[in-house]
Amino acid sequence: MSLMVKARLQSVLLVMACFVGLGQLTVDSSFGECTRFLYKQQPPTGVQNKEFRSICQRYNNQPRYATLYDTVKRIPFYSAYTFKRSDGEKHMNFHWMYEPQLSSLSATGNMVPFLQVEPELKIDEAQAVLEDYADTTMYERGQLNPDEHQATPDDKAATYTLTNVVPQVKDFYRKLWSHYLNSVRRRLNNYCHGTAYVVTGVITTGSTIRKENIDRLAIPKYIWSAYCCPDFDPNAPYEIRYKFPSFAAYGLNDIASNFIMEVSQKRVEALIKQHMPVDQNFQLFASNCIL
């Protein structure tokens, strides 16, 4: 091979590498700009799964929160976000979106409404699509970063992507989980003086939503959530104060029976270690949410 050909080949490879780098700004092995939504800018440690993809969830050209997504089960393992003080109003007038970078390279990294799906993109191979939730009368699209914990229209809109959603039993969500989200919202509104970092995720055990005899979506057995707020009101009543700087909960997402228990961060971590691909060093918040 001549020196001129080698030089041209190297130039082509360099350009290709640059484009790949641009395309992986928000879906890669790290959370990039979205580390701001993680306590001490560090994600939960000890996660071991090659199928998980780190997504910096972007909407309207701004990073909004971080999601660790399972491209085989087609649901997120967790979403991590910063809580915004709000009145808890839930907006339902946003279009559902998908993450184009799970299917192809994208320069902007913005989530895209399903109304704008490009025909050549086979987005259903690596993520959920609207058809997966069609005719699932017992389940609804449950957000891990909930609309109710965000304040601005854009931050709320960004929660309406299927990469932030898992199948939740309707009774579990409406009668239990939504009430838990509201109680945490009031607690953080009133007693968290600084930034509250929240990680909400799932534990799966094999149940799935099937379409045409194909496993499409994993159905979580448990849904869990934990928050970290080191700057809190030390004069809060004891029944509130012991739930700072961090506390957590997990709920049984089951049709026959369901419940929610508020517990310590350590209890939730222990439950996750029993069922999910994490090692014994798994930790939701760096330094256990201690400054």
Image (spheres, helix red, strand yellow):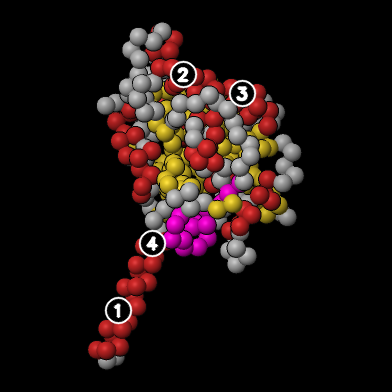
Q: Is residue 85 visible?
A: yes
- The circle drawn on residue 10 is 1
Q: Kindly indicate whether the residue at mark 1 contacts the one at mark 4 (C-beta within 8 angstroms).
A: no
Q: Which residue is mark 2?
A: 187
Examine the structure image and report whether residue 280 is included in the region drawn in magenta: no
Q: Which residue is mark 4?
A: 22
- Amino acid beneath label 1: Gln
- Amino acid beneath label 3: Leu
Q: Is residue 205 above or below residue 263?
A: below
Q: CA distance from mark 2 to mark 1?
A: 57 Å
Q: Decide which of tag 4 and tag 1 comes sooner along the chain.
A: 1
User: Magenta stretch mostly in which secondary structure?
Assistant: loop
Where does the magenta region start and end? 96-109
Disc nearest the viewer among 3 and 1: 1
Q: Position of residue 133 (x, y in %)?
A: 68, 45
Q: What element does badge 2 sit on?
A: helix
Q: Is residue 167 visible?
A: no
Q: CA distance from mark 2 to mark 3?
A: 17 Å
- Amino acid beneath label 2: Arg
Q: Is residue 272 above or below residue 99?
A: above
Q: Kindly indicate whether the residue at mark 3 contacts the one at mark 2 (C-beta within 8 angstroms).
A: no
Q: Which residue is mark 3?
A: 176
- For the residue carrying disc 2, how many other residues have a C-alpha within 10 Å: few (<14), some (14-19), or many (20+)? some
- Which of 74 and 4 lies nearest the eye of the viewer? 4
